Each structure stands twice: as structure tokens, then as C-alpha cells.
Amino acid sequence: MFFRSAFWRAKNNNAMTVRIVTDSIADLPAQVVRELGITVVPLNVRFGTEVYRDGIDLTVDQFYARLLQDKVLPVTSVPSPRAFVDAYDHLAEEANEILAITVSARLSGVHEVAVQSIGLMKRRCRVEVLDSRWAVMAQGFIVMAAARAAMAGASLDEVLTAARRNIARVEFRAAFDTLEYLKRGGRIGRAQALLGSLLNINPIIGMKDGEVVPIARRRTRVDAIDYLYDFARGYAHIEEMAIEDAAAPEEAEKLAERLGDIFPGERIYRSRTSPAIGTHSGPGLLAVSVMGDK
């Protein structure tokens, strides 16, 4: 009934127009961003005195090449209020309402900046900001669900409902070669418990209540990847699935082939973790995100 009424409004000349904004931590593939009309506000990545906009001034390949070779460790910073204001004002030229869906507020100050930027807009437009409580493609799936509802003609309140409904239906697991980068970046949260056993341990992390948490430890990389496979296989119904990697394309491809046994391979999104994530994860991260029901 929701989408039937939404499609009816989409054909109505007086229908409200909703646009979706998110940040680059969602790791959305470029094709998805284009097809669903999503606006992505990039975080900043800094190597020493050099500052780059995530995914714009610095490609994924360039970032990981530099991460492995450069003695200067990168750091990230939130977008400036101007970045969000520019996005809001631009969209307000054609939209009646805007929904910004951000990375978990417990991981980053992006949410706070997105909220504060509303008051700096030059144009009048209703803007709401939603804390996804997630990151990477788990966040991305919430954004995608909202964008599809908006494209169907849903109002901002209905789009918010669609997004909130899916917050509890997404989850991810990530296997690391090391947690050293998370430790240095201060984003490790409750996964601090894993640091005492970094040697010969392949940690598995997830998120709970908006922060990084330890999930499991595996002795070998093979065992860690098996864990990711079993995590996805534990779902009774899968609506969306994504695999993303940080400089580990061959492992990601092999895992995608395996997961094709439980979910159509052509529907598995492939993404590479953005520099904003890679700064904290380091190379070797492999993650599986799922939206569905267990």
C-alpha cells in the first residue's frame, strides 16, 4: 500500500520531491549513486599538510598505494559545514525536502556537522538528518532504501520511515589483517579487547549501538574469510548483499564467487572501502554487509 500510494504521488504534478544526501563512509558504488540520484558529501583525508576530498581528489588506488609507501600516516576529518550547505542549497533548487543519512554519530562528527549546516542554508527547504548507526555498505543499504522510496514519490516522513525500518535489518562483518590502524585512529571502541592478541590473530569486528565491537577471533586468514561466508549464510532471507575490500581484490572476488551459492552473484554489490575508511582499517580489510532477516 505504501509504494502504491507513493507511485500515485510520483505522477501527481503537486507531489513533494525528496532528495537523499549521505557521506562517503557509506562506500556506495558510483553506479548506485548515479542511478538513485544520491548526493555524497566527502570526508577529508590528510597526509601531512596535504588535504584531499575522499573519492574526489584522491582515488582509492592512489590512496592505498600511498598508505603502503608513505611514512606519514593519514588522518581523516569531517566535511566542513560549507560542504553540506552547498549540497543542501544545490538540491533545494529542485527538491522540496531533503534527508541526510550519516555514518554513526558514535564513530564520527559528520552527523553533528550535517545538522548544524541546516541553519546556514540560503534556500528554504525542509531538511532532516538521520543517524544510520552504521558505516560502510550497511549504512549504504539504508541510504539506498531511502533513495528508492524517494524516487517512488514518497514524502520525507515516509522516506524517514523506510530508512529507520531498515536500520535494524542491516549488519556487517569485517575481517582485518590487523587492528593497528583502528588503534592509531582512535575508532576502535569496544574492539579494544582484541588488541591484546594481535599476533597471529585475524580479528572479526562488527557494530553494535553505533560503535565498533569485537565479534570473533580467527587464527588464519582462511578461517576469517570462512567466518564471513558463514555470517551471510546465517540469514533466512537476504534482500541486499555487498562485499568490499581494502586492497584485497582477489580475496573479495573469491568470496563473491562462494557467496553466489546462497545469493545471486549478479546482485552482490562490489565496493572498495573509501580512503575515509581505509585510513582506519589499513589494507587487507574484507567486509560483507547484508540487509535481510535472520
Image (spheres, rainbow, N blue to C red):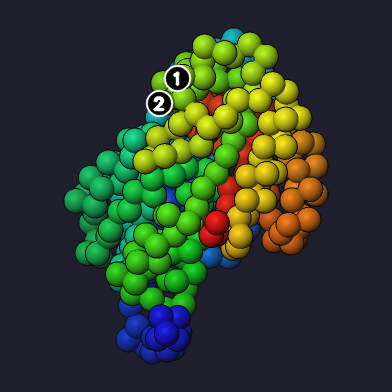
Label 1–label 2 contact, CB within 8 A: yes
Where residue 250 appears, as percent x and y from the top left, is 79, 36
Query: Element under label 1?
Result: helix
- For disc 1, the marked residue is 192
Residue 59 occupies quadrant: top right
Q: Relative to residue 45, is residue 209 drawn left or right?
A: left
The N terminus, quarter of image:
bottom left
Q: Can residue 167 be seen at all in this image of the molecule?
A: yes
| Distance from the alpha carbon under mark 1 to that under mark 2 | 6 Å
Horizontally, is 17 left or right of 151 in the view? left
Whether 118 is drawn above or below 66: the answer is below
250 vs 205, left or right, is right
Query: Quarter holding the C terminus?
Result: bottom right
Residue neighbourhood size for the residue with mark 2, other residues' Cα within 10 Å, grouped as few (<14), some (14–19), many (≥20): some
Q: What is the number of the mark on residue 189?
A: 2
Residue 83 position in % (x across, y down): 36, 44
Does residue 242 sit above or below 181 in this rendering?
below
- Does residue 128 sit above or below 280 in this rendering? below
Residue at 73 percent across and 40 percent down: it is 252
- Residue 148's x, y, as percent? 49, 69
| 44 vs 207, nearest the viewer | 207
Residue at left offset 32%, top offset 86%: 14
Residue type, numbered disc 2: Gly
Comparing 210 with 273, the one in front is 210
Instruction: Find numbered disc 2 in the image and state the secondary structure of the residue it sits on.
Output: helix
Along the line of sight, the residue nearer the viewer: 160 or 193: 193
The residue positioned 38% from the left and 76% from the top of the image is 154
Residue at 57% x, 39% y is 173
Q: Place residue 262 in its image quadrant.
A: bottom right
Q: Nearer the viewer, residue 136 or 262?
A: 262
Q: Pointer 1: residues within 10 angstroms few (<14), some, or many (20+)?
A: some
Residue 113: x and y in percent read 29, 41
